[in-house]
Image: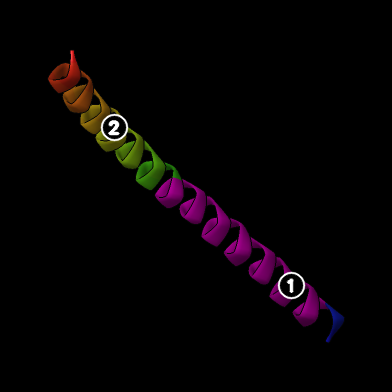
């Protein structure tokens, strides 16, 4: 029984780690795209003003 619980908890921890890593990659990609779009919009505005 203890062995089964141990295996279950290891599986749970592994699942959480994979979910956390994929979440970080997803959010990082989103932030990267958002920052590129923001800087592009900023440069467009800067060109119009000057």
| Position of 48 relative to 7 (above/below) | above
Residue 4's place in the image compared with 19, above or below, is below
* Mark 1 vs 2, N-terminal side: 1
Crowd rating for badge 1 (residues with CA inside 10 Å; few <14, some 14–19, many 20+): few
Q: Where is residue 22 in the image (x, y as percent from the top left)?
A: 47, 54
Q: As drawn, which residue projects farthest toward the left?
A: 48
Magenta stretch, overall SS: helix
Q: Of helix, strand and loop, which one carries label 2?
A: helix
Side (left or right) of 8 relative to 39: right
Which residue bears the numbered disc 1? 9
Would you name the residue on which mark 2 appears? 36
Q: Residue at image x 86%, y 81%?
A: 2
Q: How far, Cα to Cα, is label 1 from label 2?
A: 40 Å
- What x and y, as percent, mark residue 18? 54, 57
Question: Circle 1 — which element?
Answer: helix
Local packing at callout 2 (Cα closer than 10 Å; few below 14, some 14-19, many 20+) is: few
The magenta stretch is 3-27
Q: Which mark is residue 21?
A: none
Query: What residue is shown at x 49% (from left), y 55% (from top)?
Result: 23
- Residue lying at 53% horizontally and 61% vertically, measured from the top left: 19
């Amino acid at each position: 029984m203890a062995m089964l619980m141990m295996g279950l908890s290891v599986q749970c921890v592994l699942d959480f780690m994979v979910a956390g890593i994929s979440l970080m990659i997803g959010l990082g990609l989103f932030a990267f795209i958002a920052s590129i779009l923001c800087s592009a919009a900023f440069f467009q505005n800067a060109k119009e003003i000057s």
